[in-house]
Each structure stands twice: as C-alpha cells, then as structure tokens.
C-alpha cells in the first residue's frame, strides 16, 4: 500500500508547529517554534501577540518542516491543520495558511481537533497502541477523561467543571512566584518538598473534576503564611491533584471495563502524575504516556490525528472555520 503523508499545522496557542508524518505513526519532521520566551514577561499567553507571532513564523516553519522531511509539496497527501479548540486569532493563522496551501496545491484539507491530536501523540510514541482505550487528557485548557472507541470515535466520560489542571498549575506557580509556564516549575520545586498540607478533595457522582478549590486553598495558605515553605506547598498541591486524577481514572476503568490507559496533553509531562499512573500497572492496567517532547503542543500529533481522519474519509472545504470551543464529539 502507498504511504500516506500528512502535513500537520498547529497554531492553537503559543507554539507555531508544522510536521510531516508518514502513515500517522512516523515523524519525518516536527518543527516547533515556541513563543514561551515572548509571553513569559506577561505571566501568560497574550492572544493578540500570539497571533502576530504565528503570522511571522508560519511560512518559515513550514519550509523547514519540508526540508527536514526531505519531501516536496507533491509528496503530501493531505493538509491537516488544527481548527479548534484554542485561541481564535491564533487558530485562524494556521487554518488560513492550510486552506491557502490546500487551494494552491489542490490537496485535501482535513481539519483536526486539537484534543484528538494530543491523544494521537501516543500513536507516534507506541506503534503497537490501538483503540479502544481510556485517555486522561490534561492540558492548559482542558481536563477530560475520554473513552477512545476507535481512531475516530470518542466519548467524553468526565471533564473539569472549573479550571483545567494546567491552568491550576500555572496559577499556583504565579502566586508562589515561580513564573510562566508554571507546570514544570511547580513539578521541579515539589520534588524538594513534603506534602504536609491537607488540601480539599472533591467528589462528584459522575467523572467530572474540580481544581479551583485545591488551587484556592494553596493561594490562601500562601497569603496567610508569606514565609511558607514553597516546596512543601507545591508538594501538597501535586499530591492533591494527582489523587484527583487517579481517583477518577480508576472509576472510569471500572465504568467502561477497559484496561488500557493513555495520558495526553502538556500536564502528562508531570513527574508525580506519571509515577502515580505507572503504579496502576500493579493493578494490571496497561499505561502509555507520550514521549515528553510530544506531550506539549506540536504538529506531529496533529498530523497523526489528521491521518486517521483522512483515511476514514473526512474532507473539509474552504468554509472550515476556527472554533475556539470545539468539543471532542
Ligand atoms: O498541552 P499543552 O502544551 O497546551 C495546551 O493545549 O494547553 O499544555 C500546556 C500546559 C501548561 O499549563 C503547562 O504549565 C503544563 O501543560 N505543563 C505541566 C508540565 N509541563 C507542562 N504541568 C505540570 N507539570 C509539568 N511537568
């Protein structure tokens, strides 16, 4: 069978990324131009600045992706951009660029859901992985438990009712004075502390999450005790959020009776959460975690998800629009 080459384009937040992927699993190139240093001084992503930087970067990054993959435009079978969820102005840059390429090259356009992209990062890291499985999706904008039934069929089992888990990490980091992006900084500092502070837990009838109570408790402790040991505070936060996530994934495993769990999204780089999930293997659960470099936003995962949509027959046209709150199903 002929190889299928997808060109992934990702611009939903603060990374401009273009990748060339073969048969949904093999990365030929994955160029990531991050804007983190630009947004760092504002303590978070400034949407308008993100859009402008995507415009500046997109052609350069695409050219580099083709060069590194050693392919020409002719070799591409489908153009697969992220069209949501994300920042609307940022999404529009990648999507418009993809539409222009699709039109000029007369190649199929297949819009990709960013969350499906995060899930697909695991297909690249693990060639043997196939649905069905459960996915614990944790990023800066989303926290969801997804039942991945097939490569293109998904069921949302639970989601956050307030903050996304990454958002809670970033807010805690900001209040504690660690800067942006907060997740990796909280992760590192927590390793030097002890989880001595009791933080609130939540329990819902369904598989939803809430992180704002834990976050607010951390912020209140910091306000009440300005000299508090920050490492202990971060360790306590890590313990509380890890317990929330593990508790719900265990309930999800029981609910759908599937014994394969994968992590996805930027927060799956978290060392405490990774360790806790690996411990599930003692309970005969098979756990997959994407390579650290594929956890955060990148276009290879988008090209992989795009491949599965493409071979299942999905095609979009020039009417495809950016959808900032695009849902998974
Ligand atoms: O998936 P991602 O790159 O972007 C979104 O689509 O949101 O996730 C970014 C989020 C940020 O909130 C960042 O602080 C968090 O992932 N993150 C981490 C770690 N590395 C990145 N959170 C906790 N621990 C980490 N090691």
Image (tube, helix red, strand yellow):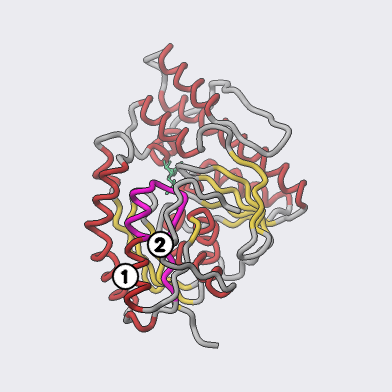
Q: Earlier in the sequence, mark 1 or mark 2?
A: 1
Q: Which mark is residue 299?
A: 2
The residue sitting at the front extreme is: 319
Name the spot of residue 204 as percent of width and height, x first: 69, 31
Quadrant of the rendered image containing residue 182:
top left
Q: Marks 1 and 2: CB-CB under 8 Å?
A: yes
| Point 37% across, 15% down: residue | 227
Q: Is residue 118 left or right of residue 133?
A: left
Residue 90 drawn in magenta: yes
Q: What is the span of residues highlighted in magenta in the rendered image?
A: 78-95
Name the spot of residue 3 as percent of width and height, x first: 49, 83
Q: In which quarter of the image is ligand 1?
A: top left
Query: Is 233 in front, or is 122?
Result: 122
| Point 42% across, 63% down: residue | 81
The residue sitting at the bottom extreme is: 1
Provide the secondary structure element on which disc 2 rests.
Answer: helix
Crowding at mark 2 (Cα within 10 Å: few <14, some 14-19, many 20+)? many
Position of 68 relative to 17 (above/below): below
Name the spot of residue 195 as percent of width and height, x first: 53, 27
Position of 220 relative to 191 (above/below): above
**Whether the residue under disc 1 has CB within 8 Å of ligand 1:** no
Position of 125 relative to 85 (above/below): below
Q: Mark 1 points at which residue?
A: 65
Provide the secondary structure element on which disc 1 rests.
Answer: helix
Crowding at mark 1 (Cα within 10 Å: few <14, some 14-19, many 20+)? many
Query: Is 281 in front, or is 103?
Result: 103
Q: Residue 220 carries which label?
A: none
| Point 41% across, 35% down: residue | 170
Quadrant of the rendered image containing residue 31:
bottom left
Q: Could you tell me how many numbered marks the image carries?
A: 2
| Point 32% across, 33% down: residue | 179
């Amino acid at each position: 069978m002929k190889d299928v080459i997808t060109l992934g384009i990702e611009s939903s937040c603060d990374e401009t990324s273009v990748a060339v992927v073969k048969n949904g699993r093999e990365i030929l190139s994955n160029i990531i131009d991050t804007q983190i240093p630009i947004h760092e001084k504002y303590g978070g992503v400034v949407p308008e600045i993100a859009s402008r930087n995507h415009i500046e970067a997109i052609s350069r990054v695409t050219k580099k992706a083709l060069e590194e993959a050693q392919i020409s435009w002719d070799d591409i079978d489908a153009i697969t951009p992220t069209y949501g969820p994300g920042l609307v102005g940022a999404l529009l840059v990648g999507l418009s660029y993809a539409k222009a390429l699709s039109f000029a090259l007369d190649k199929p356009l297949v819009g990709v859901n960013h969350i499906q992209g995060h899930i697909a990062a695991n297909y690249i890291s693990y060639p043997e992985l196939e649905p069905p499985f459960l996915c614990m999706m944790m990023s800066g904008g989303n926290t969801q438990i997804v039942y991945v039934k097939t490569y293109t069929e998904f069921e949302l089992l639970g989601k956050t009712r307030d903050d996304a888990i990454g958002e809670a990490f970033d807010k805690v980091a900001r209040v504690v004075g660690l800067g942006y992006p907060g997740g990796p900084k909280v992760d590192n500092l927590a390793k030097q502390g002890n989880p001595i502070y009791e933080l609130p837990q939540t329990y819902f009838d369904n598989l939803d999450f809430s992180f704002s109570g834990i976050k607010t408790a951390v912020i209140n402790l910091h306000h009440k005790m300005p000299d508090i040991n920050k490492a202990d505070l971060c360790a306590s936060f890590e313990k509380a959020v890890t317990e929330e996530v593990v508790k719900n994934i265990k309930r999800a495993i029981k609910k759908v009776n599937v014994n394969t769990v994968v992590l996805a999204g930027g927060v799956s780089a978290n060392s405490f959460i990774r360790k806790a999930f690996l411990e599930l293997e003692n309970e005969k659960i098979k756990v997959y975690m994407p390579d650290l470099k594929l956890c955060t936003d990148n276009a290879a995962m988008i090209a992989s998800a795009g491949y599965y949509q493409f071979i299942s027959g999905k095609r979009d046209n020039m009417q495809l629009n950016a959808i900032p709150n695009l849902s998974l199903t």
